[in-house]
Image (cartoon, rainbow, N blue to C red):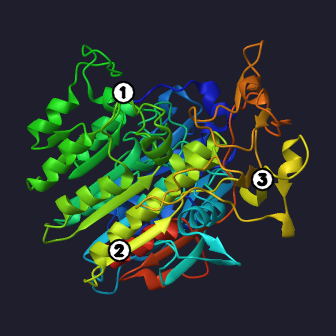
Amino acid sequence: MRGSLWLAAAIATGLAAGPAGAQTIYPIDRADILAGSRFDFKVEFPDAPAQADVTVTINGKPAAEVFGRQTSFVQNEEGQKHSALWLRGASLPAGRYTVEAKQGGKTSTVNWDVFATAEPRKAKNVILFIGDGMTVANRTAARILSKGWKEGKYAGELAMDDMPAMALISTSGNDSIVTDSANAAHAYTTGHKSCVNALGVYCAKNALTLDHPKVETLAEIVKRKTGMAIGVVTNSEIEDATPAAMVAHTRRRSDFNDIVEMFHAVKPDVIMGGGSPNFLAKTTPGSKRTDDQDFIAKFKEAGYTLATTKAEMNAAAANGTKKLLGLYNTGNIDGAFDLRLAKKGSVAKFPDQPDVVEQTKAALEMLKGNPEGFVLMVESARIDKYSHSLDWERSVFDTIMLDNAVKVAKDFAADRNDTLIIVVPDHSHPMSIIGTYNDDRPGQLLRDKLGVYNESLPPNYGPLDAEGYPTDVNTSRRLAVVYGSNPDTCDTGRPYLDGERVPAVKGPDGKTNIANEKDCAVPMAARKPGNLPFDANSGVHAADDVLLTAMGPGSEKFRGHKPNTYVFRVMAEALALGGQ
């Protein structure tokens, strides 16, 4: 099944990278490339020149000589007004490389650093926790809600706080200051920058989403070069951006059917999330596929056990299953707020969904027996999705859930010095705690109830359950959490117990979005004019740096400020994946 065709108009509006009127080289300038990893080398020449009119050299030598393989050349690629020189599946030994592409009087130059792992393998296992969209405010609010606050100090630390290594991570893509979850996760799993919506590819001028220049993912490298096991765990649809970044190569993150095929091609040992409709043949009721391929059957034929509930997952883990396909919802798995407290979302339809903590426990049980070790990616996806909805309580409950999963991993690693644990967001949201709402303050408006500075009294949330979640959040004193980006909306200052917040709805013209009047009708609700384009119906990401914490062998390399691609490098070096 081939990727979707994007019209030339889409390319013209910036979906493809590359300066107008100049040669464009992929990988791009200042790329850090793992020695021996595979990547597609491509040079695009404007105005469709003939091969005789261009030259491409690497360190002053013909590209084919350096790669040891013959390149191919296509004039008027895909009928477009450019030519392309290609080498699919290239690789290089460690070193510094200067690539020059000449056309007429114009020369484009990029520099690559191809790095090897000079030190012996440090880590047997790597566990990468991604808190999608998790801000510093998420951490702070999670600590207040789950640990408590008294006289300026917390009653305890989050598991993700209590780690020796820390760094600030910048998340921008190569095309924009503010990133998307796809190319942000791609940076962690490939070590390359890319553009919004891209997974495992550079964004070239190709019309088909699957034809852009590919870069090998961490899961692919591990499967090709080692006997290690791979696990991918999320509470989003398994085809969504962050889990897909472990296996996928597509310019468009919404190519879910293709991404399922890519999961099957790579075959991570443990796969858990939602999104079952894209695994079903189109003749099956509820399927979202456009072909007759039954990937449930294909995975079973490959030796996988299928689990669709928490009970089936736990039984599989207890029975010694080593290969699991866990699909627990037709969409995203419900978050902790609904699973534990509100019982909204799809909880009634899927009453036995596991949360991220339970998934992590099961995944570790299935992966830990591999004598060569494992790489496990665990995502708490709905931290981000709930921040898009401006529903901070749900976002923070899922931050607590992520932290509980981190504790499970730390307990696993406690008696062994062979597991690198990394906790990092893929990007941020413009989210801040500005005080507390206090119902006992005089006045009729929400802003009357807001206490700031010395009047920001601590919240009085209900008692904690055994896992550290408040059992009552609709109390008289509550955190005042605000977002810096919003459509026209109404803020109630209270938790949304009847279901995930819907901040805006379509207006009468069917194009622009307006405030959700259901929220505006709540007593004391504050009407907030939007600061986003009129077609926005939710909050957006922020370019703010994010906070990484880590522990275990290799974690000492995290310090100061680093680009997001550096996370891949630390994992690759800890596992010694770049040997010559």
Q: Give the amino acid at mark 3.
A: Tyr
Q: Secondary structure at mark 1?
A: loop
On screen, residue 484 versus residue 282, left or right, reads right
Residue 420 location (% of width, % of height): 35, 76
Residue 316 location (% of width, % of height): 14, 49
Find the distance from the CA under tag 3 to the CA under tag 1. 34 Å
Q: Which of the two marks, 3 or 1, is nearer to us in this view?
A: 3
On screen, residue 386 versus residue 354, left or right, reads right
On screen, residue 20 versus residue 272, left or right, reads right
Q: Residue at x 45, y 57 (%)?
A: 401
Query: Residue 576: in sight, yes or no?
Result: no
Query: Residue 348: in sight, yes or no?
Result: yes
Q: Which sits in the foreground, 517 or 212? A: 517
Q: Secondary structure at mark 2?
A: helix
Q: Which mark is residue 410?
A: 2
Mark 3 / mark 1, whichever is N-terminal: 1
Q: Give the amino acid at mark 2.
A: Lys
How crowded pointer 2 is (Cα within 10 Å; few <14, some 14-19, many 20+) is rated as many
- Disc 2 + disc 3, Cβ < 8 Å: no
Mark 1 / mark 2, whichever is N-terminal: 1
Q: Give the amino acid at mark 1.
A: Lys
How crowded pointer 1 is (Cα within 10 Å; few <14, some 14-19, many 20+) is rated as few
Q: Residue at x 32, y 46 (%)?
A: 354
Taking 158 as reference, is 194 above or below it? above
Taking 126 as reference, is 389 above or below it? above
Residue 398 location (% of width, % of height): 50, 52
Give residue 67's quadrant in the image: bottom left
Q: Which residue is mark 3?
A: 437
Q: Secondary structure at mark 3?
A: strand
Find the distance from the CA under tag 2 to the CA under tag 3. 35 Å
Q: Which mark is residue 349?
A: 1
Q: Residue at x 29, y 61 (%)?
A: 221
